[in-house]
């Protein structure tokens, strides 16, 4: 069993990791995980994004899941918020597209235009 001091150290380490992943200092990636998103394949997309963030040690990236984003026919949907708060909404995302979004947008800072929801909502 851990001592109180050990538990305090673990808590401090977790707090440091949380401050590193502060959304205001980096990117926030949001994956729609409502029933429609999950049915359309959002779980493998979320898993792949989390794997890439861990593999590439992207401490300035927070990955979260949300409920319905409101465009069920275009699921899986991934939203990327840059450090300035600008949002890019990607649709019909699969794990391969998720890799490109992480590589080009989250790491490279360049929006992946061909996956943007605006291209599909005409």
Image (cartoon, helix red, strand yellow):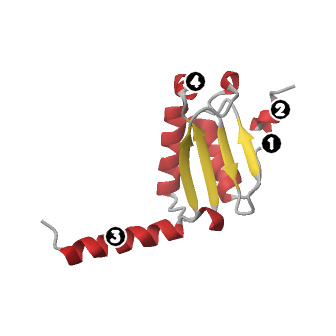
Q: Which mark is residue 11?
A: 3
Tell me the mark number nearer the camera, choosing from 3 and 1.
Answer: 3
Contact, CB < 8 Å: mark 4 with mark 1? no
Tell which residue pokes out farthest to the right in this image: 122
Neighbourhood count class around disc 1 (C-alpha, 10 Å): few under 14, some 14–19, many 20 upward: some
Neighbourhood count class around disc 3 (C-alpha, 10 Å): few under 14, some 14–19, many 20 upward: few
Q: Using residue 104 as the reference point, say whether residue 58 is left or right of it.
A: left
- Looking at the picture, how far across and down is residue 60, in whole percent? 58, 64
User: Earlier along the polypeptide chain: callout 3 or callout 1?
Assistant: 3
Q: Nearer the viewer, residue 96 or 58?
A: 58
The residue that appears at 30% across and 70% down in the rendered structure is: 10
Spatial CA span between label 3 and label 1: 41 Å
**Which of the 4 image quadrants contains residue 109?**
bottom right
Spatial CA span between label 4 and label 1: 24 Å
- Looking at the picture, how far across and down is residue 45, in whole percent? 54, 37
Spatial CA span between label 1 and label 2: 8 Å
User: Earlier along the polypeptide chain: callout 4 or callout 3?
Assistant: 3
| Residue under numbered circle 2 | 119
Tell me the mark number nearer the camera, choosing from 4 and 2.
Answer: 4
| Residue under numbered circle 1 | 113
| Residue under numbered circle 4 | 36
Spatial CA span between label 3 and label 2: 45 Å
User: Earlier along the polypeptide chain: callout 4 or callout 2?
Assistant: 4
Contact, CB < 8 Å: mark 1 with mark 2? yes
User: Earlier along the polypeptide chain: callout 3 or callout 2?
Assistant: 3
The residue that appears at 54% across and 64% down in the rendered structure is: 21
Rendered position, 122 above or below 21: above
Q: Using residue 49 as the reference point, say whether residue 69 is left or right of it.
A: right
């Amino acid at each position: 069993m851990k001592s109180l001091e050990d538990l305090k150290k673990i808590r401090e380490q977790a707090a440091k990791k949380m401050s590193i992943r502060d959304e205001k200092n980096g990117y926030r990636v949001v994956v729609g995980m409502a029933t429609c998103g999950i049915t359309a394949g959002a779980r493998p997309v979320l898993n792949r994004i989390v794997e890439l963030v861990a593999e590439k040690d992207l401490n300035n990236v927070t990955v979260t899941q949300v409920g319905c984003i409101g465009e069920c026919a275009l699921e899986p949907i991934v939203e990327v918020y840059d450090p300035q708060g600008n949002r890019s909404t990607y649709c019909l995302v699969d794990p391969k597209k998720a890799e490109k979004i992480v590589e080009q947008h989250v790491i490279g800072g360049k929006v992946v235009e061909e996956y943007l929801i605006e291209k599909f909502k005409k």
